[in-house]
Image: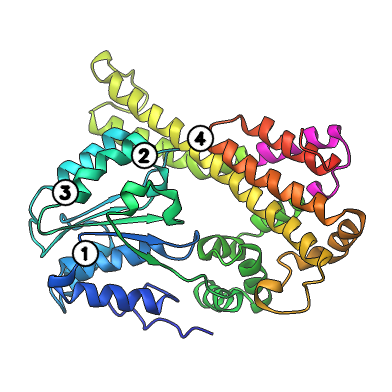
């Protein structure tokens, strides 16, 4: 098991389970002559990419031992760190242009200016091209840090201009111990949450602390197992999308209203008063941003469902090939459904299970291309019910 990170040792105290990556960034921050001007941190969701990027930024910007500045950088409030984390489906080209402009400013207070792009995989090709020149010829004291699940998620022209640091995926036991420590969850719930989240730390924490989230996940998987016909597929797809929509609204509605009220106060508009035509464009712009954020929240929720379904049929395949007696990668993710999984494994051929897994991957790609979520899920679940691609 990985040892716990030292208690709040700045700037690296919040980085958990990545000793090799931390050592690499510590060496880079302490040796200006060999410091690369652009980095790419890759790793599975929940592995700590953005946490490590912030720690590296703090080590670059602050003088050694200046904990006050380090805390400011880690909180993303220091003027020499700029963080782009899109809450929309993609990073817009105008956001990329603003980043490039900022990259050419000299540091105002710190030793370096650091630009962090947390969702670099969400850039379209023309947006990525905006960054190329800045990555090719950056100012002397500007460092770029991009984050993505894999270097394959970025254009080759981007990959050739960055130094890649790959994060390790922690073990289930490691994540469970961390979740129990952070949340006070009992060991059984912590282990189950870490396993169901497939070692995604943020998702494991949510499952461990939200009984409703655990129940929704269980109901979704059981509903998928029960799909036997096209009618079942249509019904279950609708229920999944509705559940994801309700979840997305619950996560955003209070925030949306708070943002709207804050903007109206800034514009000097009292509560309940009509919005004057002169400032209506600003209110409309906020509402459009909120709609785009809601769209991403919904698609992220459905993608989490697809990840759970992928784990379900992965377990079926492991049973079919007799790979359930070991540890680590051989462990069943959804062992609470053991009898259902074994019944499915006996009823299906491995080839049919592989067809379903391929269809899940295709569905995820289709959703990235803005295919209607309900239609995409209906198509997937029809494959589940028939064993054939529609």
For marks 1 and 3 on the same chain, the one whose residue lies earlier in the sequence: 1
| Label 4 to label 2: alpha-carbon separation | 14 Å
Name the residue: 29% across, 27% down.
Answer: 270
Q: Mark 2 points at which residue?
A: 91
Position in image of residue 148 (x %, y %): 41, 54
Quarter in which the C terminus is drawn: top right
Q: Is the magenta stretch mostly helix, strand or loop?
A: helix
Task: Report how far apart the C-alphas of labels 3 and 4 lie in the structure.
Answer: 30 Å
Tell me the element at label 4.
helix
Residue annotated with mark 3:
103
> Left of 237 or right of it: where is 51?
left
Dot 2: few (<14), some (14–19), or many (≥20) neighbours within 10 Å?
many
Please name which of the two marks, 2 or 1, marks the residue nearer to the observer: 1
Residue 375: horizontal and vertical position, in percent? 68, 30
- Check disc 1 and report the residue beneath it: 36
Secondary structure at badge 2 equals loop
Mark 3, mark 4: which one is toward the viewer? 3
Between 49 and 369, the residue placed more toward the observer is 369
For residue 234: magenta?
Answer: yes
Give the answer, above or below, for where 93 lies relative to 32: above
Looking at the rendered image, the quarter that the N terminus falls into is bottom right
Q: What is the C-alpha distance between the residues marked 4 and 1?
A: 36 Å
Image disc number at residue 295: 4
Of tags 4 and 1, the one toward the viewer is 1
Q: In this view, does 329 lie above or below 104?
A: below
Please state the extent of the stretch shown in magenta in the rendering.
223-243
| Residue 12 in view of the camera | no
């Amino acid at each position: 098991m990985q040892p716990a990170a030292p208690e709040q040792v700045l700037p690296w105290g919040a980085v958990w389970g990545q000793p090799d990556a931390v050592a690499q960034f510590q060496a880079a921050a302490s040796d200006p002559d060999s410091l690369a001007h652009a980095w790419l941190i890759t790793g599975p969701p929940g592995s700590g990419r953005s946490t490590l990027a912030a720690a590296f930024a703090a080590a670059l910007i602050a003088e050694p031992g200046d904990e006050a500045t380090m805390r400011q950088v880690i909180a993303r409030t220091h003027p020499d760190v700029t963080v782009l984390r899109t809450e929309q489906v993609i990073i817009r080209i105008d956001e990329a242009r603003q980043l490039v402009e900022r990259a050419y400013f000299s540091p105002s207070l710190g030793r370096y200016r650091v630009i962090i792009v947390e969702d670099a995989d969400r850039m379209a090709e023309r947006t990525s091209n905006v960054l190329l020149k800045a990555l090719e010829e950056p100012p002397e004291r500007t460092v770029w840090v991009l984050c993505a699940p894999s270097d394959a998620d970025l254009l080759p022209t981007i990959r050739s201009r960055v130094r890649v640091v790959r994060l390790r995926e922690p073990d289930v036991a490691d994540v469970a111990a961390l979740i129990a420590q952070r949340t006070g969850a009992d060991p059984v719930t912590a282990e189950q949450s870490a396993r169901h989240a497939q070692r995604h730390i943020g998702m494991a924490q949510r499952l461990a602390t939200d009984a409703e989230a655990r129940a929704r996940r269980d109901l979704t998987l059981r509903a998928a197992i029960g799909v036997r016909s096209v009618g079942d597929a249509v019904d279950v797809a609708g229920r999944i999308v509705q559940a994801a929509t309700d979840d997305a609204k619950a996560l955003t509605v209070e925030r949306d209203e708070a943002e709207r009220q804050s903007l109206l106060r800034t514009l000097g508009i009292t509560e309940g008063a009509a919005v004057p035509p002169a400032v209506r464009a600003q209110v409309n712009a906020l509402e459009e941003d909120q709609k785009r954020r809601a769209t991403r929240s919904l698609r992220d929720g459905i993608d989490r469902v697809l990840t759970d379904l992928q784990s379900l049929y992965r377990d079926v395949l492991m049973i079919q090939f007799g790979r359930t007696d070991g540890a680590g990668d051989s462990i069943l993710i959804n062992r609470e459904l053991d009898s259902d999984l074994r019944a499915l494994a006996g009823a299906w051929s491995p080839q049919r299970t592989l067809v379903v897994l391929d269809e899940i991957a295709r569905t995820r790609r289709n959703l990235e291309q803005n295919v209607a979520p309900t239609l995409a899920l209906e198509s997937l679940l029809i494959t589940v019910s028939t064993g054939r691609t529609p």
